[in-house]
């Protein structure tokens, strides 16, 4: 009896310590560290890349380190779903994508694709922390489309939460970056990785440079729900639209932190202060709209740690969103 009590006490103490961000070796959500995706059902990945944004906002490569620093706080039960996501299946942190040519965007995107092909081949589902939004292009070139194991050779549906469309087609580059953070949502459709007719872009807002800013997204086939549209819809209708558009497609969630209001996430690379963005509760519920669907992965992008508040609030928000994406995957896998 005493031995059993001692073991229970030890487990409780370890659980308590695992939630303290300042204790131990930082990994994403205090998950085990491994370099072999074949050992995992869900692979947690850092993608420290910031040359796809094409601007002076180059500190997004510090995002994975910042989220690892605080993410132990998210090693918790999922109260809405009533389960422990991080105790469901094999979940591990496989480190960062090596990017030795960090100042060469196109070389980095190729390196990202190569790294994620190993994850796809292993059958692990990735949850990634960026990095700027160009990383999504490199990731989905690996885990969706003709050679993908995770989509069985098919295209993927996108749940894309963002203040911006990222379907820039006026030029073939953005300040010199071709596979840029402004282009990925366009070229992935043209290349056959994303099925735009089953994909949604939600939360788009701001005073844009052109009045026809949504035209490329509409032409590509995306279902677009601007922030103005969202505010005029009942939330249950938004959820119904998400599930109807995605249908039974495999789905990938890409979450740009600038879809959030600046009061919620101040440290983002392309802040849109003129129109209110999502609150954190709204954003989390939108991610939860895909509960039970075949979520093959997701990413959280555009964190600028050097602009964060002293309490690291934007990094903590990023960790919360990544935890929610992970929870959708873990929930789906628990149903299989």
Image: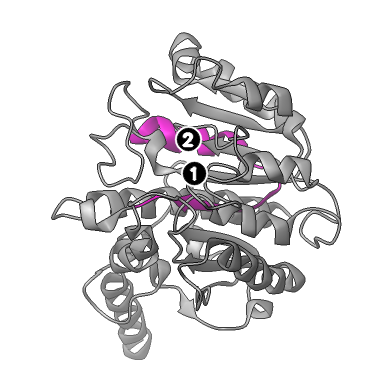
Residue on which disc 1 sits: 255
Residue at horizontal 63%, vertical 72%? 115
Q: Position of residue 303 (x, y in %)?
A: 35, 52
For residue 85, side relative to residue 185 (left or right): left
Q: Quadrant of the N terminus?
A: bottom left
> Residues at badges 1 and 2 in contact (C-beta under 8 Å)?
yes
The quarter of the picture where residue 196 lies is top right
> Alpha carbon of mark 1 to alpha carbon of mark 2: how far?
6 Å
Dot 2 falls on a residue whose secondary structure is: loop
Q: Residue at x 66, y 65 (%)?
A: 113
Q: Quadrant of residue 270?
A: top left
Could you tell me which residue is drawn at 71 percent across and 69 percent down? 117
Left or right, residue 318 beside residue 95: left
- Farthest-out residue, left: 310
Looking at the image, the residue that sits furthest to the top is 232
* Front-lying residue, 5 or 223: 223
**Which residue is found at the position 57% from the left and 48% from the top?**
328
Judge the density around disc 1: few (<14), some (14-19), many (≥20) Cα neighbours within 10 Å. Answer: many
Residue 121, placed above or below residue 288? below
Query: Looking at the picture, how far across and down is residue 278, in whole percent?
Result: 37, 29
User: Residue 168: percent from the left, percent from the top?
Assistant: 58, 35
Image disc number at residue 162: 2
Q: Which residues are magenta?
A: 280-303
Question: SS for tag 1?
Answer: strand
Compare marks 1 and 2 and give the one earlier in the sequence. 2
**Was residue 289 drawn as part of the magenta stretch in this picture?**
yes
Does the magenta run of residues contain 24? no
Say which of 54 and 224 sits in front: 54
């Amino acid at each position: 009896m005493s031995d059993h009590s001692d073991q229970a006490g030890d487990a409780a103490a370890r659980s308590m310590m695992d939630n303290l961000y300042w204790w131990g070796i930082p990994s994403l959500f205090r998950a085990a560290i491994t370099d072999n995706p074949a050992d995992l059902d869900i692979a947690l990945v850092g993608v420290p890349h910031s040359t796809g944004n094409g601007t002076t906002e180059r500190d997004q490569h510090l995002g994975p380190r910042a989220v690892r620093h605080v993410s132990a706080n998210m090693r918790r039960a999922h109260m809405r779903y009533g389960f422990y996501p991080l105790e469901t299946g094999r979940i591990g942190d496989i480190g960062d994508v090596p990017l030795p040519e960090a100042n060469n965007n196109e070389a980095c995107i190729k390196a990202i694709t190569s790294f994620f092909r190993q994850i796809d081949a292993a059958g692990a589902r990735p949850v990634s922390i960026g990095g700027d939004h160009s990383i999504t292009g490199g990731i989905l070139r690996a885990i969706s489309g003709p050679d993908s194991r995770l989509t069985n050779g098919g295209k993927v549906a996108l749940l894309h939460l963002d203040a911006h469309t990222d379907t820039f087609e006026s030029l073939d580059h953005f300040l010199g970056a071709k596979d840029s953070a402004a282009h990925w949502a366009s070229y992935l459709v043209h290349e056959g990785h994303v099925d735009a007719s089953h994909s949604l872009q939600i939360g788009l807002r701001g005073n844009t440079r052109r009045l026809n800013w949504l035209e490329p997204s509409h032409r590509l086939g995306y279902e677009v729900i601007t922030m103005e549209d969202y505010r005029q819809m009942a939330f249950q209708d938004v959820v119904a639209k998400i599930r109807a558009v995605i249908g039974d497609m495999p789905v990938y969630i890409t979450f740009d932190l600038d879809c959030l209001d600046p009061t919620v996430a101040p440290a983002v690379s392309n802040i849109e202060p003129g129109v209110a963005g999502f609150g954190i509760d709204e954003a989390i519920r939108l991610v939860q709209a895909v509960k039970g669907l075949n979520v093959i992965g997701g990413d959280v992008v555009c964190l600028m740690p050097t602009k964060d508040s002293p309490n690291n609030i934007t990094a903590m928000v990023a960790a919360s969103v990544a935890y929610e994406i992970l929870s959708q995957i873990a929930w789906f896998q628990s149903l299989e």
